[in-house]
Image (tube, rainbow, N blue to C red):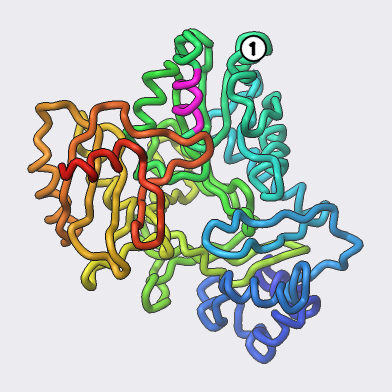
Amino acid sequence: MSALQEQLAYLEASSSFYAERLRGVREHVRTAADLRLLPFTTKDELRDGQRRNPPLGPHLCAPRDRLVRMHVTSGTTGDPVAVGFTERDHRANSAVGGEAFRIAGVRFDDVVAHCLNYALYAGGIADHMALEASGATVVPVGTGQSRRLLELIPKLGITGIFGTLSFPAYLASRAREAGVDPAELGLRHIVTAGEPGAGLAAMRAEIERSWGATVADTFGMSDVWSTMGGECGEAEGLHLTVLDHAVLELVDPDSGEPVELEDGASGELVWTHLRREASPLLRYRSSDLGRLWTAPCPCGRGSPRIRIDGRRDDMLRVQAVNVYPQAIGAVLADEPGLGRHCVVADGDPVVPPLRLYAEAPADFDLARVTDRLHATLRVRFEVTRLEPGSLPVAEHKTRIVHRTARGDRLPDVVETVRRAGR
C-alpha cells in the first residue's frame, strides 16, 4: 500500500469529518492523480468544525492524549485555526524544515538569531526546532528585542538572522539610529519567511546592501508544515522538501479544475498530508497562488521548485479585472532604480486608478512604469514618486496594499502627499 493510500485509510478510520468524504471513494484513489475524485477542504470548513467541536474540530485524527502541542494559524484572513501535533508530527516537521533551511544556506557553523514571534503560531517554536535540525546553533530572540539584538550579534558571534523580509530592513534602520553600520556587525546570511519576495525585491536588494550579507527565502504554512521549501543560491524558486510528507496539486483558482504539474505551470496550491497524525489535511485549498518548476535546478537538485506569486484573498477586483499585489511587485522588480512601494486602492469595490507610491530618484521615468503596469495588468494606474527611503518598514510584516474603504491606515508620507493633492 502506498503512503497516500495508508494516509487515506487512516483518515477514514480516525475522523468522522474525513470518513464521510472518503466513504465509497477511497478504494478508487490509488495515486496522486486520483485525488481529484475527492472534494476540497477549505479553511472555512476547518473554522466551522472547530467552532462546533472545539478546540481542534472533527478532522482531528489522533487521540487527544497523544498531542504534545497545539498551535494556531496567524489569523490574518479570518479566525485562526488550531493545529495539533503528535511527537511524530513534530519530528517530521523538524526534519522537513531543517532540510529547507539547509537548502536556504544555513550551515552547521552558523549561529542564527530566530526573530519570528514565538507566541501561538508554528513559525515560532516549531521553526526554532527546524533550525536546530539543520545543524545550526539557534538564539531565541523573538520580536521586540531589536536594540538588544544589535548588542548581541557581535557578543554571541551571531552569523545569521531568520525572520520576515521586513525585519532585517527594520533592524538596519535601528542600527543606523544607534550610530552603527549594519555591515560592520558581521552577519553572513539572512533567511526570510512570511512575505513573498517577488513583491519586495527592492527591500531584499536594500537588505543585502545594508548588511553585506546574502538573503534567501523559505516557504511554509502553519497548518501544513511550518517550513517546507528553501531557496538555493540560484534564486530560481524554492525547493520543496515535503515529497515524503505531502502531495501537491495545482488547480485553477477560479474553477478549481486540475492543472497539470509540468514545468512552468501556475495555479492555486492544494496540499494533502502524508504521514500526518494529529491534524491532517486532505486536498486543502491553500489560497496561495504560485508557479511550479519540475526541471532540474542549475544548483543540481532535482526537487520541484515553487514561487508564491500572491494569494486569492489578497486579490484586488478592479472593474472586472483581478489584480494581485505580487504581480505589481513583479513588474516593478524589473525597474532598476525603484525602491520600495505601496499601493492605495480607493473604493469597495475598488475604483481605478490604483495609486502606486514608489521610492525613486528625481529623474526616474515614472511614465514608463505607468505604461508597463497598464499593459501588463490591464488596469489603470497613477504612479507618484516618493523620496528614496521615505516609506516605513515594519518590524514584523510590511503592508504593501492599503484599502481606504476598509479603514487601512496609510503611511505618513503617503498621507502627506495625498493631502497635498500631488
Residue 332 falls inside the magenta stretch: no
Dominant SS type (magenta): helix
Asked if residue 288 lies left or right of residue 263, the reply is right
Asked if residue 266 lies left or right of residue 47, the reply is left
- The location of residue 131, given as percent across then percent down, is 67, 34
Q: Which residues are magenta?
A: 167-174
Q: Residue at x 23, y 45 (%)?
A: 418
Q: Is residue 398 above or below residue 319?
A: above
Q: In this orientation, which residue lies closer to the viewer: 129 or 412?
A: 412
Q: Is residue 374 above or below residue 28?
A: above
The N terminus: image quadrant = bottom right
| Farthest residue, direction front | 419
Q: Residues within 10 Å of mark 1 (few under 14, many from 20)?
A: some
- The location of residue 167, given as percent across then percent down, is 51, 32
- The location of residue 179, given as percent across then percent down, is 47, 8
Q: Which residue is mark 1?
A: 157
- The location of residue 376, given as percent across then percent down, is 17, 55
Asked if residue 94 lies left or right of residue 291, the reply is right
Q: Residue at x 9, y 49 (%)?
A: 371
Q: Is residue 211 above or below residue 309?
A: above
The C terminus: image quadrant = top left
Q: In this orientation, which residue lies closer to the viewer: 285 or 13?
A: 285
| Secondary structure type for disc 1 | loop
